[in-house]
Image (tube, grey):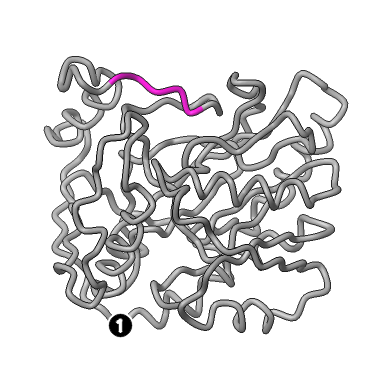
């Protein structure tokens, strides 16, 4: 609860779709474990597994913990959710249909979701975030969480996935400024070194209570006028921080957005040191990979 993750809403949004919900709980410095137990749902199965600090290279500890949870699952499909992601109840029929129709297609390894990223406030959307990610995979021991647990792979190859119209509501950048600053600082602790062994975390020993104020970059954002998952209603109504300054510029004439899109799809032009990265789930980005939210509970 310390960093404002909506993990209770996240878990509850998936419970209607699963027979069992497996959670790996790491080293909690707050009351997250007690909050998890308070959900009091018979489907929830909690296992405590302290995180190995030696595995923080490039966020790999996140994938390791995810794979531990996957190995404990016994269903036909595995639904993976991160602590700042929530599923909309309107998409339940679409998700169920996707699982039913693709189960007898052995060439389909997973089901990909559309992403809605929110920044600064619940009615402001960031269109530059990754557009799609796999969140449902077959219960196949060859399918593994990879990298920093944002995607999956199978024998070193990307998964063959069905593209559904179901959405993931990603609230990673919507929380009070102080909690956002502490979350950003804590998150960097999982990226001490890149894959070449270069140190990239310059504030790893910095106390979280003295971090700089977090500033949301709103230059590429657009208004969001759709509905949110019903489970988020109480959290949204309780918002008590000032929305960052936001001036909407239509994307077709937003130079910052066009620059961001080109930088994302042509990284070698903007920075020769950055190469295209296959995230193993069918989506692409430029290195370094986009964030996967660190959680005190990881679920598969």
Identify the residue at image location x=45%, y=22%. Answer: 278
List x then y, in percent, for residue 73.
80, 50
Asked where in the image residue 260 lies, by quadrant, the reply is top left
- Secondary structure mostly taken by the magenta-highlighted segment of the chain: strand
Was residue 276 drawn as part of the magenta stretch in this picture?
Answer: yes
Region in magenta: 275-279
Q: Nearer the viewer, residue 99 or 38?
A: 38
Please tell me which residue is depicted at 31% across the width and 39% down the height of the picture: 128
The answer to whether 238 appears left or right of 36 in the picture is left
Q: Look at the picture and state if 156 lies above or below 96.
A: above
Return the residue nearer the eye: 20 or 246.
20
Q: Residue furthest front?
A: 54
Residue at disc 1, secondary structure: loop
Q: Which corner quadrant of the image does residue 159 belong to?
A: top right
Q: Which residue is mark 1?
A: 240
Tell me residue 232's x, y (percent): 52, 70
The structure residue drawn at horizontal position 18% and vertical position 17%, both measured from the top left corner, is: 272
In percent of width and height, residue 274 lies at 25, 23
Q: Report crowding for label 1: few under 14, some 14 to 19, many 20 or more residues within 10 A (C-alpha).
A: few
Q: Would residue 264 be counted in the magenta stretch?
A: no
- Above or below, 269 against 76 in this view is above
Q: In this image, 263 relative to 136: left or right?
A: left
């Amino acid at each position: 609860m310390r960093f404002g993750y909506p993990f209770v809403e996240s878990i509850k949004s998936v419970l209607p779709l699963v027979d069992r919900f497996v959670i790996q709980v790491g080293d909690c410095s707050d009351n997250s474990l007690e909050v998890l137990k308070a959900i009091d749902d018979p489907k929830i199965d909690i296992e405590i597994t302290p995180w190995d600090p030696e595995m923080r290279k490039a966020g790999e500890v996140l994938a390791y913990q995810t794979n531990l949870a996957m190995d404990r699952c016994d269903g036909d499909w595995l639904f993976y959710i991160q602590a700042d992601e929530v599923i909309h109840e309107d998409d339940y029929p679409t998700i169920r249909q996707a699982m039913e129709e693709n189960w007898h297609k052995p060439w389909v390894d997973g089901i990909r979701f559309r992403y809605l990223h929110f920044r600064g406030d619940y009615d402001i959307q960031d269109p530059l975030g990754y557009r799609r990610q796999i969140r449902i995979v077959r219960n196949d021991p060859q399918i593994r969480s990879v990298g920093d647990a944002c995607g999956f792979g199978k024998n070193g190859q990307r998964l063959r996935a069905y593209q559904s119209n179901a959405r993931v509501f990603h609230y990673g950048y919507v929380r009070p400024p102080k909690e956002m600053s502490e979350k950003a600082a804590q998150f960097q602790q999982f990226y001490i070194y890149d894959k070449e062994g270069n140190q990239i975390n310059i504030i790893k020993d910095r106390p979280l209570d003295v971090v700089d104020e977090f500033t949301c970059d709103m230059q590429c954002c657009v208004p969001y006028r759709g509905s949110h998952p019903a489970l988020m209603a109480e959290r949204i109504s309780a918002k008590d921080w000032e929305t960052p300054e936001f001036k909407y510029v239509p994307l077709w004439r937003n130079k910052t957005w066009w620059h961001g899109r080109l930088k994302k799809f042509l990284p070698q032009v903007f920075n020769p040191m950055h190469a295209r990265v296959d995230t193993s789930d069918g989506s692409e980005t430029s290195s370094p990979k986009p964030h996967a939210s660190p959680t005190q509970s990881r679920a598969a």
